[in-house]
Image (cartoon, rainbow, N blue to C red):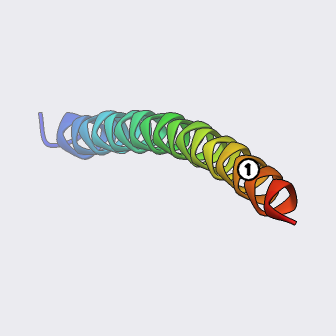
Amino acid sequence: MNEMMPSKRKYNANIISISLTRIRGRSSQTEKKEQEMDVEALALRLSKIKEFLLILFKEIHSMR
């Protein structure tokens, strides 16, 4: 019986290790998705700023 205990502990440790790896993998995937969403939001903001600046420059140019 005592001979089985170390292998069972090792087995449990491996399961815990695999579980933690999966959790880390999920969190890194979630972070990656959040970063992609942040980049998309930033791109949208930049395009709106670009549109605003184009309108502003056209208005300034038409005043001359």
Quadrant into which the C terminus falls: bottom right
What residue lies at 25% left-to-right and 46% top-to-bottom? 6
Q: Nearer the viewer, residue 48 or 28?
A: 48
The answer to whether residue 22 is left or right of residue 58 is left
For this view, does 9 lie left or right of residue 21?
left
- Residue furthest left as drawn: 1
Residue at numbered disc 1: 50
Could you tell me residue 4's position as x and y percent? 22, 34
Q: Secondary structure at mark 1?
A: helix
Give the x, y percent position of residue 33: 51, 34
* Position of residue 57 measured from the top left corner of the image (x, y, whole percent): 80, 59
Q: Amino acid at mark 1?
A: Lys
Q: Is residue 36 above or below residue 46?
A: above
Residue located 71% across and 43% down the image: 51
Residue found at the far front of this picture: 64
In this view, the residue in front, 57 or 30, is 57
State the residue in front, 27 or 17. 27
